[in-house]
Image: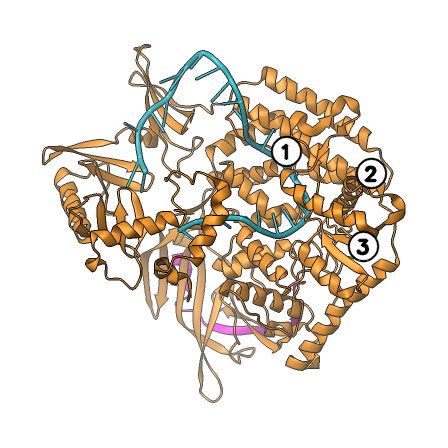
Amino acid sequence: MIKNLVIVESPAKAKTIEGFLGKDFVVTSSYGHVRDLEKKNNGVEIENGYKPLYTVPADKKAVVNDLKKLAKTAETVWLASDEDREGEAISWHLKEVLKLNTEKTRRIVFHEITRSAITNAIQHPRYIDDNLVESQQARRILDRLVGFEISPVLWRKVKPSLSAGRVQSVAVRLIVEREREIDAFTAESKFKVTGIFDFVDEKGKLYKVKAELGERFDTEKEAAEFLEKVKDAQFAIESVVKKPSKKTPAPPFTTSTLQQEASRKLRYGVSRTMMIAQRLYESGKITYMRTDSVNLSDEALASSKRVISKDYGEKYSKTRKYKTKSANAQEAHEAIRPTYFDKESVDGSPEEKALYNLIWKRAIASQMADAELEKTTAKISISNSGLKFTASGEVIKFDGFLKVYIESSDDDENGKDSEGLLPPVYEGAELKYDNITATERYSRPPARYTEASLVKKLEEMGIGRPSTYAPTISTIQKRGYVDKEERQGKERNYRVITLVGDNLSAVDKTEITGAEKGKLFPTDIAMLVNDFLLKYFPKIMDYKFTAKVEKELDDIARGERNWVTMLDSFYKPFHDTVEDTIENSERVVGERILEEDHNGKRISVRMARFGPVAQITDLNDPEAKPEYAGLRSGQKLETITLEEALDLFKLPRDLGEYEGKKVVVAIGRFGPYIRHDSKFTSLKKEYDPYTVQLDEAIVMIEEKRKKDAEKLIKVFEENPDYQLQNGRWGPFLKVGKQNYKIPRDVDAKELTYEDCVKIVEEFEKGGGKSKSKAPAKKTTAKKATAKKTTTKKAAAKKTTTKKKK
DNA sequence: CAGTGAGCGAGCTTCCGCTTGACTT
């Protein structure tokens, strides 16, 4: 018999709270939602007042059964899910599923996991807020209807398995539109002029002063004329202005800001960040990691203050309370912070340590004093020109929070170099130039989104929730709308004119432009789907759609709007559009005709079954099958040129014969390659697949052979399928297409055929992990085999020692 | 790893938000 059963959403939270409450309380968790709309018929009876059809998903059956048992024996059940729309709905679903009557049920809420907050909550129970529950229900149903009615339209009109949704479709839209801005962008260059000046103080000490001209020149000619002119000029300090300024720390992390900083400072993708944070949370090192709140509990404020005063001194401490700016924040939790501020570092994997350290610094810094700076700006006049140089320097008078933490920004990579102290120049001081340089600088296109910067944008627009940012990003990648890619940059020349002494010289230098790493690129499918949805479902695609829905949901939550009429006024016109689109829209093929008649042939590109293709259609022979060539990575249906399309048909190129076998060059998934005797050799970078000659190819083939020979350690006569080879990670055993690890402490050359057979056997016994292999016959037997492999095998131990460090 | 690209048309795909496993390399 349990006196009090408390149900929260997360097991880690349950553990903590149990410690705060006495023996009379058992705390358990629901693992989030316990019911959802069923899948068939979209889970909604529309004609029956949008009646939702709820079901317990398969993976929640066990949880619900356990909760049922506990609830039955409990005197009082405390529903303690989060204090927001979703949390209220979870409580309601629990009450329904567990068949709890009102007398034995209490609803409590708290938004920080501290002893005082919990005990306070227990003393102030309330009832389930039906308006809030209805608001969640309307949200859920609307999302289901949007997703499950539009997606099938895409299957029919574009491609199977595609998806659309209130959140994901605008996320894709952002990426598509950014890509088009970049395509439409043309770089313009200007000449930026910088000078290094010599300044000598009264004692004869020489200083170098770095300064930049206030104006940039449009052309090389103007820049050169300016440099020519100032050859004979006198330079003098016209004014020196000192200005105090201060910097204020950023608030502690929310999910979104954590993802951004971990991306910038640690180069983690958003799901990696969340996985690591989850581990820190589960081991009690940080507070909850899915939050939109920047609030810190009073206990946290007090303990951070203690730590700061002790470690840095009292003047470094400044208690701050932050207010959330984002529109949709539900603030059910605290900001992300260390559970114990006095732990500057924690045990764990390197990445856990790194992320914890970031969270600790950010939270600590948020409670520290402003940094005080002094910025000095000196203007330098030019005797024969009205233009001026400006030199500036910045000194930190008091470091404050900068002692522990500096926030990064997305443009840091191209950032200005940090300004140091300016030499002790004074008004009227004369300067001589050491050199003056005009450098051609190109304007830059808007930046592509990273995972984290997309999250930031979505959050700003109030689209999506902390628990869905990372999953949304992986969904749009899984659906083939977005690729996270690396792109090689291109070389570009820029002009540099330098004046040293009387000598004016100009040179060309090269820089790499357009190189990208870990950026989100839209696919052709994304562009086609985006345009299709924009055309037929502009309301859903509107960036303000979610905000509008949110407002109505808030009205429902306040009891000022009826959820059924809200859904009805959305759904009726929406459903008409769906029907109309199915009926009247054309199938999307994305065809672009590059040239209608190119020597009797039409050159076009379009989306085919296996992706985007270029197509040559013979206009004179309607019977002839068109020729096809797939587009290469980086090429897009909407930007590929006629020349690029025609180039695609020049490959594969037949170079001739070598040793009686054909030599062919082509471009594959991993770049240009040579195929000979059904073997592949990558083309070396210095060769072009369109022009490479047979003799050059033969050299590469021979080189590859030599390398392969070195790779091969031994082939067993007993069975030539068994080969020992040298790979990237040391020797390994290859049997047919399957590779096997060789125990570390064994010399591969010494292995006999019998040894190798044993290695294979051991591996298979261990439940072989290969994808190509036939799967284990019975999945139910998995547990038993797994156990065996860990306990029994002495021999296998060797193969697994690698894991231990 | 790297060729395909039409088709009789089965039966499948899909949303957003709450949560953690149980699995790999």
Q: CA distance from mark 3 to mark 2?
A: 39 Å
Q: Earlier in the sequence, mark 1 or mark 2?
A: 1
Q: CA distance from mark 1 to mark 3?
A: 53 Å
Q: Chain of mark 1?
A: A
Q: Position of residue A100 (x, y in %)?
A: 83, 43
Residue beneath the point at 58% across and 59% down:
A279
* Residue A263 or residue A383, whichever sits in front: A263
SS at badge 1: helix
- Mark 1 residue crowding within 10 angstroms, few (<14) / some (14–19) / many (20+): many
Q: Earlier in the sequence, mark 1 or mark 3?
A: 3
Relative vertical location of residue A261 with respect to residue A62 in this rendering, above or below: below
Query: Is residue A329 shown left or right of residue A204?
Result: right
Query: Is residue A365 shown left or right of residue A481?
Result: right
Q: Nearer the viewer, mark 1 or mark 3?
A: 3
Amino acid type of the residue that numbered disc 2 sits on in the rendered structure: Ile
Q: Which residues are magenta?
A: A223-250
On residue A793, the disc is none
* Residue A528 or residue A220, whichever sits in front: A528
A125 inside magenta stretch: no
Q: CA distance from mark 1 to mark 2?
A: 23 Å
Give the residue at mark 3. Answer: A1
Residue A181 visible in the picture? no
The chain shown in cyan is which? B
The chain shown in orange is which? A
Give the residue at mark 1. Answer: A541
Q: Chain of mark 2?
A: A
In the picture, which quadrant includes the N terminus of chain A? bottom right
